[in-house]
Amino acid sequence: MAATTHTVTNQVPPLVGLDVFAADRVLSEAVERHIEPAVLPVALVELGELGRAAGSAQAQEWGAQANAHPPVLRTHDRYGHRVDEVEFHPSWHRLLGHAVSAGLTDAWGRPAGHVRRAAGFLVWSQAEAGHGCPLSMTHAAVPALRTDPALAAEWEPLLTSHTYVEGLRPPGEKAGVLFGMGMTEKQGGTDVRSNTTRAEPLAGEGEYLLTGHKWFCSAPMSDGFLVLAQAPGGLSCFLVPRVLPDGARNVFAIQRLKDKLGNRSNASAEVEFDGTWARRVGEEGRGVRTIIEMVAATRLDCVVGSAALMRQAVAQAVHHSTYRSAFGGVLIDKPLMRNVLADLALESEAATVLAMRLAAAYDADTEEERAFLRLALPAAKFWVTKRCTAVVGEALECLGGNGYVEESGMPRLLREAPLNSIWEGSGNVQALDMLRALQREPGALDAFLREVGQARGADHRLDAAIKGLLTELADLDGIEARARRLVERFALVLQGSLLVRWAPPEVADAFCASRLGGDGGAVFGTLPHSLDLASVVARARPVAS
């Protein structure tokens, strides 16, 4: 019998049992905007099924279990033979299997494939973010492999399969495979041209033996990897299978798994090659150019993944405030809390709209859209991933002490939040990449300006921000030291232009006032009080339509 002093009141019901896709009005609108009518009905059915699964108690339990039981490295079997296998909790495999069956590694050949996949990735990774790494790497390997038609014909059907097959065996015996990537080494990190892993040619066409050590290898339990190594003709890209066609294990010594801040359910490893068989992908000496399309695709997933973390955090904050009472009323009705929630909702909506616009550019695959992506993608990767940590931290605070407790799920989101800003090139790398594009590819700036120009004249603060961006570009003195400021302006102008075109007036007005017009503070909750903040918050509330 409960003690009379322990009556439980004023507690918030769990956010469970909803359709994560349908409850996200911003994402649903983006899908309807970017997918052609002939494909849209099928896409909506797919995303609805995935959204209901992501919001279920079962998926939430899988996510909690996968994070509570991180992967374990098993280097040897009981007899002392090297096996170099990574063991995962069954919940990890359930999450990954559901994602693969939902097509989250299949974008390159389906109608509106990138928008459908990005929306699905945004929905499903809200159940658990860690297993997004192998999904992202597998999806992103396709454009790199297409530089070699023979390799693409062999591997692409397996990479884009909707069948998840657990365990290592020859690829020819599997209905689907996963891929990882190994670029960085301890002496160089992001400076991959300083890699020292050697590739020695064999007699067979395109065959090599690799010797070296990769400091970060993503998804080490995968069936194959794209890696960089120094061949006689320079830095080159190689495909390293875990299991050779005859069934023998390739030399792939996993030295240890990284003990990471977050992303606990996912394995990241240090691996050694010592006579490891590999196939060259692309030409010798053009390794970076070959693998860069894989990097670009994973950068988009960093944007989408951060948008997913923001959406989940904001949904939890709005949900909590809808049910929690304090100081004589429900939190969501308090003007100050409403300001905080609206500010967070703006950031989440801007991230989602931008992520989905980038995915649509991939689907269009025109020269104009490729030029647009050349600046828009690094700008989005820089800005959205950096805003993620701030958004999740503030959303956690909306739950007060309850948010600081593991059972709320918010600490897991907060630990995950910085990851996408670091992976696939940190902030400085994105900024330098944008400078390189501005200097070498003038068509990229023209395409970017045509994109944001579609909203010109609709909001004077956006117009002024575009003019200020052009002024900034006209002054090249000390451009590298100013690169972060420049990239931030690119991202904000692009987000503002998209919201002015597609978001409700109250959202676009609040964004332009606070992000472009200077009428906002350095912390969340400093929006002008005269704005329609209640409508902004209501739009973010996770209630199925």
Image (cartoon, rainbow, N blue to C red):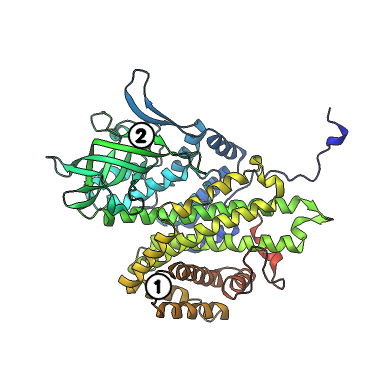
Count neighbours of disc 2 (C-alpha within 10 A) and say few if under 14, some if 14 to 19, many if 20 or more: many
Q: Residue at x 68, y 72 (%)?
A: 528
Which amino acid type corresponds to the residue marked 1 in the rendered image?
Ile
Q: Is residue 384 left or right of residue 22?
A: left
Mark carried by residue 532: none
- Of pointers 2 and 1, the one earlier in the residue sequence: 2
Spot occupied by residue 90 in the image (x, y as percentages of width and height): 50, 31
Q: Nearer the viewer, residue 201 or 505?
A: 201
Camera-side residue: 32 or 61?
Answer: 61
According to the picture, the residue beneath numbered tag 2 turns out to be 254
Q: Secondary structure at mark 2?
A: strand
Which of 484 and 349 lies nearest the eye of the viewer? 484
Lateral position of residue 253 relative to residue 418, left or right: left
> How many marks are shown on the rendered structure?
2
Q: Amino acid at mark 2?
A: Ile
Image location (x, y in percent) of residue 523: 63, 63
Does residue 54 lie above or below 32 as drawn?
above
Residue under circle 1?
Answer: 479
Left or right, 300 with respect to 18, comes to left
Residue farthest to the top, as pictured:
79
* Residue 274 seen in the figure: yes
Write down the quadrant of residue 58 in the picture.
top right
What residue sits 51% from the left and 44% below the top?
Answer: 261
Q: Tell me the quadrant of the picture where the C terminus can be found.
A: bottom right
Residue 20 appears at what percent x and percent y? 59, 49
The secondary structure type at the circle numbered 1 is: loop
Q: Quadrant of residue 223?
A: top left
Question: In the image, is 518 to the left or to the right of 456?
Answer: right
Residue 510 position within the rendered picture, expressed as x and y whole percent measured from the top left: 63, 70
